[in-house]
Image: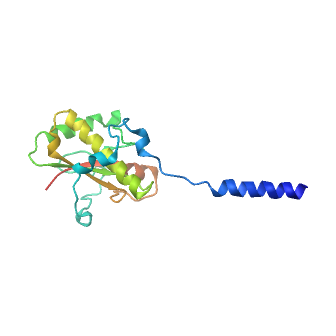
Amino acid sequence: MIQKSIIMTLTLSAILLSGCSQKAPNLDADAGRNNVSDSTQIAGETVSIDENAYGNENGTFNSSSDGFQSIYFDFGDYGISSSMENKIVGNTNIANNVKTQIKIEGNCDEFGTDEYNYALGLKRAKAVKDSIVAQGVAADKIVLISYGESNPICSNPTDSCYAQNRRVDLRLAK
């Protein structure tokens, strides 16, 4: 009798534990919270570039170029925090004074699937675009790119390093 209950307990435990797995968060569950309800709606605003030709010029924490400053995000988030508002204003001032298109590049840390990080990078880029367009920059002057996790500027396994990779960089399109 006792052996039978032990076997039943072990069997039930094995069944319960074998079905557990961790999934990446669903970005669309937060639709509307951060200005983008579906990553496919911004696909027409993206451009393709040769990622092998792209590189970080100087390895600094601000990986944007042409006077722009990188915008950083919390883990799994694509909403612009109040601590980044001054950088948005500075980037808007630069964007209003250039004649060429501006590339807004979304980046992520290494956590999550490739698909999740690509979508998160697009949503981060879209949030920055929406912010600078709301301040007067012409929307047709901006193209979006998502690198997902493929363009890290730091590769040490530390929280501060991961934070550097959760960013949007701005560059002049050349």
Q: Residue furthest left?
A: 99
Residue 39 in view of the camera: yes
Q: Quadrant of the C terminus?
A: bottom left
Q: Residue at x 26, y 49 (%)?
A: 169
Above or below residue 58? Residue 98 is above
Q: Nearer the viewer, residue 124 or 74?
A: 124
Q: Quadrant of the N terminus?
A: bottom right
Residue 68 lies, in percent from the top left, at 21, 45
Q: Residue furthest bottom?
A: 52
Residue 124 lies, in percent from the top left, at 32, 45
Above or below residue 25? Residue 87 is above
Q: Nearer the viewer, residue 107 or 59?
A: 107
Specify how the rendered protein is coloured: rainbow
Above or below residue 146? Residue 37 is above
Residue 96 lies, in percent from the top left, at 13, 39
Q: Is residue 129 left or right of residue 99?
A: right
Q: Nearer the viewer, residue 145 or 108?
A: 145
Q: Nearer the viewer, residue 3 or 168?
A: 3
**Picture quarter containing residue 148?**
bottom left
